[in-house]
Image (cartoon, rainbow, N blue to C red):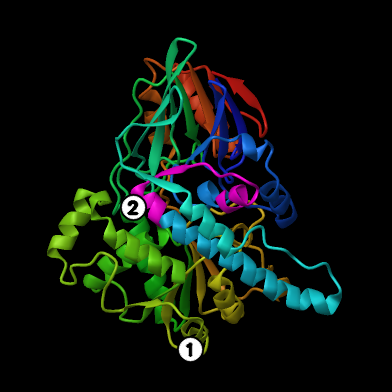
Amino acid sequence: MHIRFLGAAQTVTGSQHLIEVNGHKLMLDCGLYQGKRKESLELNRNFQFPVNELDAVILSHAHIDHSGNLPNLIKNGYRGPVHAQRATAHLTRIMLEDAGHIQEENAKYMNRRRIKTGEPLIEPIYTAEDAAQAGRQLVEQDYDEAFEVVPGVQATLVEAGHILGSTAVILDIEESGRKQRLWFSGDVGRSELPIVRDPVLPMDADALLMESTYGDRIHPSTNQARDQLQAIVSDTLGKGGKVIIPAFAVGRTQEIVYALHQLADKGDIPQVPVFVDSPLAVNVSDIFRAHPECFDAETVKFLETDKHREALGFDMLKYVRSVEESKALNERKEPMVIISASGMLEVGRVLHHLKNNVDDPKSIVLIVSWMAPHTLGRRLVEGQTQIKIFGEVYDRKIRVGHIEGFSAHADQQGLKDYALATKGTVKKVFLVHGEAGPAEMLRGQLASAGMTDVHYPAWGSRAEI
């Protein structure tokens, strides 16, 4: 058996891992790479293997850096199954169609200017229709139920604790009379994360393929993050400003809404409107409501006692669907909170809100997620005061805040505990989905704990298991 690391290798985004076993090929995840636009387009458009030779795909979860290049895979001729946990499949369908629509709309928007300047026109990587076809190839699977992926390979999806429906993927493999288990972590969640259940630790693994995003740090607790959110929101609204929160439509938006709900119920933030301005996030929240079986005990208890009987709804909250409603928010000058996608400020309605408030020092852009290198979100975190929005340069006067404790990824201790759960059986560990600094620090921590066969594979490299 061989693994080829074709994405999220020595970087965080674009998860793609190609398994070759028993003369068949299956891929774990098919994510979009996010970074410099020219480089991203090149990497995302072109697959590094013959697509027609691929037999199966398994998704760990619905985030775009794990699922977002599926429509391009289908567009290039893949006609096989895409296995995913049921909630993941529901989320992925709407996320991919939204991604295709956004790519089409952004291309139109940018091309209006390019036509005037004579620059080459932009083509979307895929369209909403390509995405719809990808959705039709999703095969829904239950947690903890084994299924055959290709001959000799049984897969089981177990809770990863990252977002709704997120999974680790267990591959029990028989090849040439030899049996072994490969455990792919997907994105490892945190045991204290609200809404979703805690991650299942790996067991009996011979090889471990795991993320390393935060291998260099310990997160503040979720309670600390909520306290920071309360302080920043109260301070900004008290000054008469707007709080603009770029948030991933799946996971982070619901987590922030849940936190604001709790703060509002306690009277810890001012009574001002809170808008979720993302059609995708609105639809995702509906899917969250449809899958209470994925909720943790804390959320179930909250639902039983809350006056709204609703985790993602409260008196001050309004979900915005139409473009007209979204545009109207920029005509309003009173204090408010706007939660909008995309999480890294690369596409979506949040860019329009930033553009319309970029010169307001009373307002704040509140970063609550990890930002990939070369994205606008990362530039804001780094403190840049001249930024580009839709290709135009602006002097930034709006303030920037940053809260790290809302991360849905395990920190160094959580990742260390995850890996050490396999210490008695594992022969090789491969660290992916992480930049060099965090991955190397985690590798050092594991070496100190007696796990020495730990690798940090390069993009495009191949390993034998």
Of the 4 image quadrants, the one containing the N terminus is top right
In the drawing, does residue 266 fall left or right of residue 159? left
**Quadrant hosting residue 432:** top right
Residue with the most extreme top position: 177
Q: Is residue 278 among the parts visible in the rendering?
A: no
In the drawing, does residue 54 fall left or right of residue 169? right
In the drawing, does residue 130 fall left or right of residue 59? right
Is 89 a magenta residue?
yes
The disc label shown at residue 236, or none: none
Q: Residue at x 41, y 58 (%)?
A: 252
Is 149 a magenta residue?
no
Amino acid type of disc 2?
Thr
114, above or below 5, in the image: below
The disc label shown at residue 333, or none: 1
- Looking at the image, is mark 1 or mark 2 earlier in the sequence? 2
Circle 1 sits in a helix, a strand or a loop, which is it?
loop
Amino acid type of disc 1?
Lys
- Is the residue marked by circle 1 packed among few (<14), some (14-19), or many (20+) residues within 10 Å? few
Q: Is residue 451 among the parts visible in the rendering?
A: yes
Q: Which residues are magenta?
A: 70-90
Residue marked by disc 2: 222
